[in-house]
Amino acid sequence: MRKAIKNILFISLFVSFLFSCQREKKDDNTEKLNAYLESVSRRDSKVLSKVLVVPVDKGCGFCVNKIIEFLKVFNVPDETAIILTGSNDTLVGNFISENGLSDFDSLLKDGQNFFFLNQLSFLTPVLYQKNGGSWSSLDLVPINVEKSLFNLFFSKNSNPLVDTFYTLKVSGKIADVDSVKSQFSVRLSSVQGFGVDSTFTVSHGMRQVFGRNLSEGVILQKDAQSFFYYTYVLNDSMSAVATRNMPQFNR
């Protein structure tokens, strides 16, 4: 009996110790993050409720590319800070130039590796969310990055086209575009010249998102779970001009 009681007491003390360590680490991370935001943010750090830390030179290229994709479609929410972190200023600057983010004034740049050195990020992007007076963290990995970015950048009630466009998958040469009441009917023929033609309908709002790219003779390609889409305008039977396009919803 005494041995059993001792074991229970030991387990209780061990569990308490673990929770205490986790709480201390969480409080320590909160202090570090608050101190950083107060030193670099042009906004009052108290209004920020979400911070997305993006390591530009480490791990999970898929996750980083998804973040770039969302940044190019949506404005950064007022309560959110996006921080690009890397080993040096040159590396962060090159990342910004190579990904066409030079005009994004809202991005914060950490070229001193503050977040890695202070154990606030490692190999994946990290989303910090304020709960009360402390920050909780969520590592963004391929299995959760898309859902997390949707929750961060987009409210489904604000624009119903976004989710529809994101999940849309089309591929083929546009053979015909017809207006049908409140929708457009787009017929695609196989690029390779075989297979059955397919038709999909889009609303007038979707037509505006595609812009002039929905025109006969253009090859249209878009994967599901992506905002990027490609158009190929044929010069002749052997060549085409390819364009990588981005929809414009909230900009």
Image (spheres, rainbow, N blue to C red):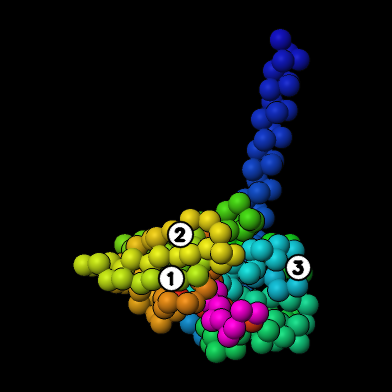
Q: Residue at x 27, y 71 (%)?
A: 179
- Quick check: 179 left or right of 137? left
Residue type at tag 3: Lys
- Quick check: 157 left or right of 192? left
Can residue 206 be seen?
A: yes
Q: Position of residue 116 (x, y in %)?
A: 74, 68
Residue type at tag 2: Asp
Does residue 208 show up magenta in the picture? no
State the residue in front, 157 or 122.
Answer: 157
**Residue 197: mark in rendering:** 2
Quick one: label 1, few (<14), some, or many (20+) residues within 10 Å? some
Depth check, mark 3 against mark 2: the one in front is: 2
Task: Give the SS element for disc 3.
Answer: loop
Q: Which residues are magenta?
A: 230-238
**Image quarter (top left, top right, bottom left or bottom right) of the C terminus:** bottom left
State the residue in front, 209 or 30.
Answer: 209
Dot 2 and dot 1 residues touching (CB under 8 Å): yes
**Image quarter (top left, top right, bottom left or bottom right) of the N terminus:** top right
Name the residue that disc number 1 marks.
Answer: 175
Q: Of marks 3 and 2, which one's residue comes earlier in the chain?
A: 3
Q: Residue at x 59, y 65 (%)?
A: 192
Question: What is the CA distance from the residue labelled 3 to the residue labelled 1?
Answer: 44 Å
- Quick check: 20 left or right of 243? right
State the residue in front, 194 or 171.
Answer: 194
Name the residue that disc number 3 marks.
Answer: 58
Q: Position of residue 124 (x, y in %)?
A: 69, 62
